Amino acid sequence: MKSLYPVWANLDQEMMSVATELALVELLLSGCTTASDHHYLIPTGLEHAIDLQVEAAQQLGIRSIFTRGSMSLGEDDGGLPPRHTIQAEQVIVDDSLRLINSYHQRDDGAMTQIALAPCSPFSVTTDLMKETARIAKNESVMTHTHLCETLDEEDFCLEKFGMRPVDYLEDVGWLNERTWLAHGIHLTVKRFEDLVKQR
């Protein structure tokens, strides 16, 4: 994945718009009526990437849940992404609120929704995970992240947070009905089942 960061960092507005439109048209042609995208690398010059995605979806008439992804923990601070691919946390928070206020539809059958989606425990700080959970609760939006995709993620979480990934999610306020996860390949199943039963 790290090899893709330099490629993604060079996306421009036209590339973003065309890529989103192409992907959504392919989904529509296959019979899909609802799409979601987890876009978490927002380089300089592409700060309005999610706006471009919303515009493409609305023009095509496809129901969508676009996530305001984020990365704030660079490799020089123990994270995975290179420094040039991360954003300041206040920038992420401010833009998340802007997107929710601009586009998130709350009615039944909503065509456009915004969710908040820090990339993974490798790439955001604990403070941002907690703030994202707080905003999501206050604004009644969903949260999304990658979790337990690789075995080294568990090692990372144990070393950095003193707990496994699922326990970490519980600790930062993410295990609730608003959250959906990508991957989940290496979940600590017993602990995960216990937490689900407690809900």
Image (tube, helix red, strand yellow):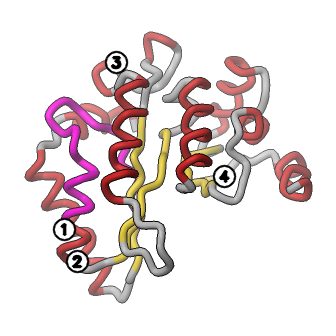
Picture disc at residue 21: 1
Look at label 3 and name its amino acid: Arg
Q: Choose mark 1 or mark 4, whichever is in front.
A: 1
Structural distance between the alpha carbons of marks 1 and 4: 30 Å
Give the magenta-colored segment's residue range.
36-55
Mark 1 touches mark 4? (CB < 8 Å): no
Calculate the distance from the C-alpha at mark 3 to the C-alpha at mark 1: 29 Å
x, y percent for residue 123: 49, 29
Q: Sequence-wise, which precedes: disc 2 or disc 3?
A: 2
Q: Amino acid at mark 2?
A: Val
The residue at the point 18 percent across, 74 percent down is 59
Q: Which mark is residue 185?
A: 4
Which residue was labeled with disc 2?
25
Q: Check residue 83 in the rendering and tell me which mark sits there, or answer none.
A: 3
What is the number of callouts on the image? 4
Q: CA distance from mark 2 to mark 3?
A: 34 Å
